[in-house]
Image (tube, rainbow, N blue to C red):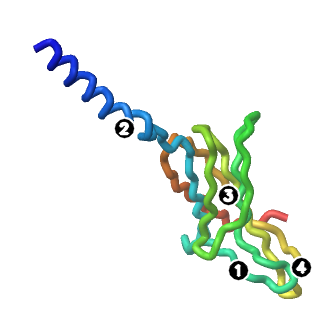
Amino acid sequence: MKKKNLLFSVVLFFSILPMALFTSCDKDTNCYLDVKVVDEGTINPISGEMIPGHGIAGAEVEVYQDGGTVYAKGITGSDGVYSTYFNAPAIVKIKARLQLYNDAGQAAGERRGETSVRLQEGETLTAQITLSSQVYY
């Protein structure tokens, strides 16, 4: 009886061992962030568009942590969203700005907006920034 139990235990051990060795326990620890930039008056997304002589001009988004190593910068896409990710949770500040141009194609001020969010491990957070209708020069 003892030999039977020992044999059963050995067989069970060696049948479970490969599963333990070859099964990954990795989990996604990245923090994903989608920043949607919208117009204050219309609540429409600020999408990236081609402006002759200036290239693609959408809202410029900057994500950073005061005194930290978290930093990302980019332009909103055609859907008005800028997406990025970080390797660890953090509380970050997000600033967005839209450069304005006059009819002659010259810079004519900018509109701005900002917010702060907490990034969570393995989650995607969608933050919305509403650009003020006020123009800054």
- Please, what is the three-letter code of the amino acid marked with disc 4? Gln
* Discs 1/4, front: 1
Q: Is residue 4 above or below residue 97?
A: above
Q: Is residue 9 above or below residue 79?
A: above
**Of the image marks 3 and 4, the number of the one nearer the N terminus:** 4
Residue indicated by mark 2: 19
* Total labels drawn: 4
Residue 49 position by quadrant: bottom right
Q: CA distance from mark 1 to mark 4?
A: 16 Å
**Of the image marks 2 and 1, the number of the one nearer the N terminus:** 2
Q: CA distance from mark 2 to mark 3?
A: 51 Å
**Of the image marks 1 and 4, the number of the one nearer the N terminus:** 1
115 lies left or right of 74: left
- Per the image, label 1 sits on a secondary structure element best described as strand
Q: CA distance from mark 2 to mark 1?
A: 51 Å
* Discs 3/1, front: 1
- Please, what is the three-letter code of the amino acid marked with disc 3? Gly
Q: Residues within 10 Å of mark 2 (few under 14, many from 20)?
A: few
Residue indicated by mark 4: 106
Q: CA distance from mark 3 to mark 1?
A: 19 Å
Residue indicated by mark 3: 113
State the image coordinates of residue 90 (x, y, percent, origin top left): 61, 38
Q: Residues within 10 Å of mark 3 (few under 14, many from 20)?
A: many
